[in-house]
Amino acid sequence: MTEKREWTYDGTELAWLRDRLGRPEAGPGHVVSELVPSGYEAYVRIFHRFEAADGSGRSRTWQAWAKDSAVPFHAELSHWWLRDQEPSPGRSLWQAQDGALDDSSRRALARVLAGVSGDQATYFAYDLAALLWDESQPLIRRASLTDLETVREAVRSVVGDSGPEFWWPQDRSWVVTTDYDLLSTYVGCSVDTAELLLRDDELETLPVTPQTRVDWETNPPQHP
């Protein structure tokens, strides 16, 4: 994760969100509250799907790979805990995309959230991606949830295939964050919306808290 910012958010649609990010006290690594604004009833982690790098079209869940690696499927699960069963020279067979939900998970997430928010306008924002791609300010688009893929296509030449890093509806009843450097997406929302996400068969999810670590350098829980 990159913390340095070279622009101000004053007067932008991102100002409210940035004002509610941070952590109340110092600690190791990075936590959910640095990614998703405070004040939500519930927080959910959505794992980016692993896909085989051999072109076979195979996929693998984090839960299944964690089981094969004899580690808990846990809110702070890191891909570094997972052991390759079929190693490729210099590269793992199983790849998850950092900075972007896989297509099927992104569609499922948009479907669930559309059921919650209806047709109200949604904001889609690119922050760190815009900075790294030498834009002069964050990119923010306002559209409906059904236009998510249209928005992504419209900015692909500017920020690549990442993100959106943040998306939220007009009423701010939920926020989705896909950090540019991470292999999971995090959502702040109501308890009812969290239950919908956690029950959806097309999403691999776990509940988290604002204090849950999100970086890759956590250690697996020790079995008693």
Image (cartoon, rainbow, N blue to C red):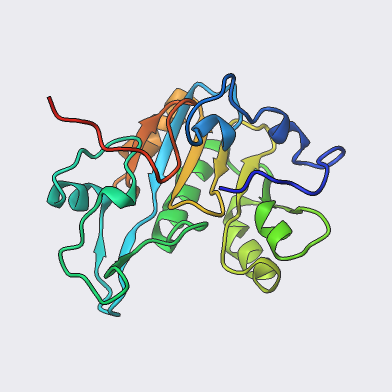
Front-most of residues 44 and 78: 78
| Front residue (pair 51, 215) | 215
Q: Position of residue 22 (x, y in %)?
A: 62, 29
* Residue 47 point in image, percent of width and height: 37, 48
Q: Residue furthest bottom?
A: 55
Outermost residue toward the right in this view: 11
Quadrant in the picture for residue 163? bottom right
Count of all numbered marks drawn on residues in the image: 0
| 133 horizontally vs 44: left or right | right
Q: Is residue 72 above or below residue 93?
A: above
Answer with left or right where residue 131 lies relative to residue 106.
right
In this picture, residue 59 sits left or right of residue 95: left
Q: Which quadrant holds the C terminus?
A: top left
- At a point 53% along the width and 44% down the height, the residue shown is 114
For the point 58% across and 41% down, the residue is 118
Along the viewing direction, whichever of 166 and 197 lies nearer the viewer: 166
Q: Position of residue 40 (x, y in %)?
A: 55, 24
Q: Is residue 20 above or below residue 182?
A: above
Q: Where does the image place residue 109, in percent across and percent down from the top left? A: 45, 48
Residue 157 position (above or below residue 199): below
Horizontal side of 40 relative to 82 (left or right) equals right
